[in-house]
Image: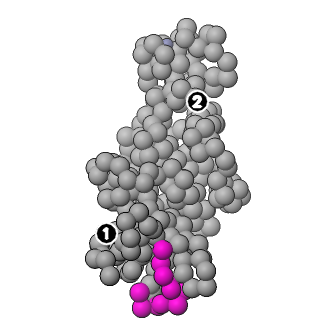
Amino acid sequence: MAPTAKTEGLLLRCVDFGESDRIVHLLTPDRGRLTAMAKSARKSMKRFPGTLDLANHLEIELSHPRRGAMPYLERGRLLSPFLGLRALPARYALACYLIELLDRLAPEGGADSDMRELFDFSLGALGAVEQSRPDVKLRVLLELRALDALGLRPELRHCVRCGAQPRPSLPVGFHVGEGGVMCGPCGKRVEGLLPIHLGTLRALEQGLRLDIGRLDRLALSSQALAEADLLVARFHRFHVGLELRSEEFLREVLHPVG
Ligand SMILES: [Zn+2]
């Protein structure tokens, strides 16, 4: 039997496979996202005592049967189940949404420090959702933070074409494909820019800096929230492609305003 490696994992997805196995997607602090086979997971309460649930933070043991083959998840020990997520439908829906986003976009492998940061972000975000009464503002800000942690931070301050800081007196647009704000002169002949106020961009920058547990304290006018919602939604869709499975459920249970 190959030697096992111990690490931590956040459970992103779990699907039954064959008669008794499960395939799990895990976010780890050292290898990014990985897929592993949990042999006999539906039978063995000893190796997986109620641990293979979505959003569980686990200590895991992996073994590698052959080079290049899918690793086996040998054991999982529960570190945190984020039980508070299951207390409100909106919390659970927002957590599922963030987890699905991570499952789609988290890289398999990468620089160690980036993977650790992404892992820590993910635990921090679930911890924040666990304490919250989720609304659209929290969803928009956490989604922006998740995209940032995934290396997809939109440029909110400098024009993506010329590098200038847009002046307050001129209209500003956001170019989804180029991933950032475009100043008035550069955006003149560009089609499909999302109009956006500088105040909204500044608020989103603040949202990127704030302690993740305090995002609900950020003030956003209803106009800024509508602009931010559209910007993040389009930016997300550009990178993810299809609608996430959890989007509809989230829309149904989330309060429209804070
Ligand atoms: Zn410009």
Which residue: 45% across, 37% down?
153
Whether 139 is among the magenta residues is no
Magenta stretch, residue numbers: 37-47
Q: Is residue 80 left or right of residue 104?
A: left
Cα separation between marks 1 and 2: 37 Å
- Density class for disc 2 (Cα within 10 Å; few <14, some 14-19, many ≥20) is many
Whether 39 is among the magenta residues is yes
- Residue 4 location (% of width, % of height): 30, 76
Q: Which amino acid lies under the numbered mark 1 shown in the image of this protein?
A: Thr
Which residue: 58% across, 37% down?
235
- Which of discs 1 and 2 lies nearer the camera? The answer is 1
Q: Is the residue at mark 2 in contact range of ligand 1, meaning its CB lies under 8 Å from it?
A: no
- Density class for disc 1 (Cα within 10 Å; few <14, some 14-19, many ≥20) is some
Point out the tag, 1 or 2, that comes first from the N-terminus: 1
Which residue corresponds to mark 1?
Answer: 7
Residue 207 appears in the rendering: no
- Residue 233 location (% of width, % of height): 62, 41
Quadrant placement of the N terminus: bottom left
Q: Is residue 83 left or right of residue 237?
A: left
Secondary structure mostly seen in the magenta stretch: loop
Q: Which amino acid lies under the numbered mark 2 shown in the image of this protein?
A: Val
Q: Could you say which disc has been placed on residue 176 in the image?
A: 2
Give the SS element for disc 2: loop
Give 83 or 44, whichever is nearer the viewer: 44
Give 48 or 73, whichever is nearer the viewer: 73
Residue 19 appears in the rendering: yes
- Residue 134 location (% of width, % of height): 56, 57
Q: Is residue 209 left or right of residue 185?
A: left
Q: Could you say which disc has been placed on residue 200 in the image?
A: none
